[in-house]
Image: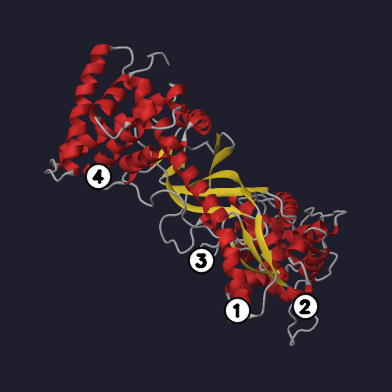
Amino acid sequence: MTDPETSAEHLAIARQAFGDEFVAFCLNCKLPLEGAYDDDNRVAALAELATLAHFTLNPPPGRDGYSVAWRVNLTQGSDTGGVIYGLRRFCGGEVQRPTSEDETELRLLECIYEAYPAILLPPSANEIPPYPDLMGMDSETFGLLVESFLLDEDLKRLFPNQAGRIEDPSQPDKKTDHTIADHWWMAGSGGTAFATIVANNLVEHAFRVAALRDERSLDACLQHGADGLRVARSLARGEVARVLHVTGYSNLRLQAGLTSIPLGSSELRSLSSRGKACIRPFGESAELAELAVFSEIDEQLVDLNPRIDDEKEGEAVHNKRWLKYFPKAQESLDKRRRNANLFRYTLLLATTSEVITAVPRGDMVLNPLTKPTSFPVGGEHLSVVPSAEVTAEIATSLAEWTLRVDEHHPTSLDIGMRRLLSAATTRPDDMDGFVDAVMCWENIFGDSQDTSLKVCGSLSRLLEPDDSERRRKLYESLKKMYELRSKLVHGASEPDSATASRQRKEAVDIAIGAMRALYDWPNLLKARNSVERWKSTLIGPSSR
């Protein structure tokens, strides 16, 4: 039997190469690696892992260590399921191969099963989660998935005829590798799609969703795979399908003990290190997201065309397709931008003692047939507000305000919402923030003439409906601020920094208070514009 000192050395090498989670899976023990070498089988398994670790820490030129780890687990037709699953079984662990009466589902689940240990590896140096590239590993299991994909009654519609199938003279037996068509999606992605890549996207989708939700088990990955296939078939039939949409945010964290907050039909969740890497915007080097809003949006295949070899004809088809595709993609993008703004706006309404904000750090639509890219979509990518913690009290208020905003917020207040967000959270200059806040006032109660009376009078009545003396004093204060705004935009000298900061805070507080109060006046929220709102407030009945 190997002495404990040698086993400890093997364990240290394995942990360095593969990380604790991967090693614990192989040894069938709990973290923090309790009993890692307390019996002969685990001692022998550790020695095997140490040997594999040597190739991971010292990979051949052109191959990173993770690809070596994936390759050693390939089943290659083996009944035991490869080295990694073999080690786990050797150490007493149970690993059941997936089963399904659906041929395509079975092939997909087998690919997920084959590649699963890879997601237990720690994120690589460039912070990209280690998704297994089954296409580059000569996996027989993946080849069967591609074949099944192109025979599936629904999925084969994505590659509608032989015109899209191109033979590679150097590989005459691998026509499916070059089966292509152009896919354009309502949520904004599109371009040339290879059958092999689309099949691999289905596998990656299961691991990506698991990483975002911080679900580590094989069962969870298999379930996400099955769910993704169901959605993929619906999309291939040309139907509108609901797909996962995730928007990441920094500058905000959940209090210890809070892992998620229900936000109506959405959910705010903390992100693991793998989840943060998933949602990192393309080309972004700034701070990673700490949490994300999980929701669902509509997705649909807007257009599908086989690749056209004739360059001029192909360009004409592309231009026609773009005219059809772009408006729907822009509409989806605009909705996601608005939802990001509504979330940040709701944070302002939900907190009374301080201003807190979330900074958007990436937006991702998880269509299981595409490889999603995270791009910045909504809001400013900076903040003048310090990082904050969402306490249990704020979480309760946020959940309640989300329901109110989702149900009642009118589009006629969207400009005011955006000006308020700018004034309260992103403008580095206090007077710019002050001007934005007063613009929010005008979006609530403005008009083209006699604006001071209409805006300030309506705000004072909205905020002090029951006390005439307090309402009169507030009106005088608001009128002075409104006059200052008019002077500033016409070139008057700006106040000193202390005065500017105070005036900005006062104007922002009024704007936030007014937005909150509107949700207690249903008739004002139903008004079509700011003119109807001020008339209802100043001329209409005072009852709510």
Percent x, y of residue 472: 22, 17
Foreground of the two, 367 or 271: 367
Which mark is first along the chain, 1 or 3? 3
Query: For mark 4, what is the residue?
Result: 432
In screen coordinates, is 8 left or right of 247? right
Rounded to the nearest angstrom, the CA distance separating label 2 from label 3 is 36 Å
Q: Is residue 47 left or right of residue 283?
A: right
How far apart in space, not on screen, are marks 3 and 4 (Cα)?
Answer: 41 Å
Q: Give the amino acid type for the residue marked by disc 3 in the picture.
A: Ala
- At a point 32% along the width and 39% down the height, the residue shown is 424
Q: CA distance from mark 1 to mark 2?
A: 26 Å
Tell me, yes or no, whether the two marked residues, 3 and 1, touch with CB atoms within 8 Å: no
Which numbered disc covers residue 355?
A: none
The residue to which callout 3 is attached is: 125
Mark found first going from the N terminus, 1 or 2: 2
Residue type at numbered disc 2 = Lys
User: Which is nearer the N-term, disc 3 or disc 4?
Assistant: 3
Residue 29, given in percent of the width and then of the height, sits at 69, 52
Mark sitting on residue 312: 1
Q: Quadrant of residue 151?
A: bottom right
Q: What's under tag 4, amino acid-wise?
A: Asp
The residue to which callout 2 is attached is 175
**Dot 3 lies on which element?**
loop
Check disc 1: other Cα within 10 Å, few if <14, some if 14-19, many if 20+: few
Q: Disc 3, disc 4: CB below 8 Å?
A: no
Say which of marks 3 and 4 sits in front.
Answer: 4
Q: Is residue 418 left or right of residue 110?
A: left
* Disc number lying in front (3 or 1): 1
Give the number of the mark in front: 1 or 4.
1
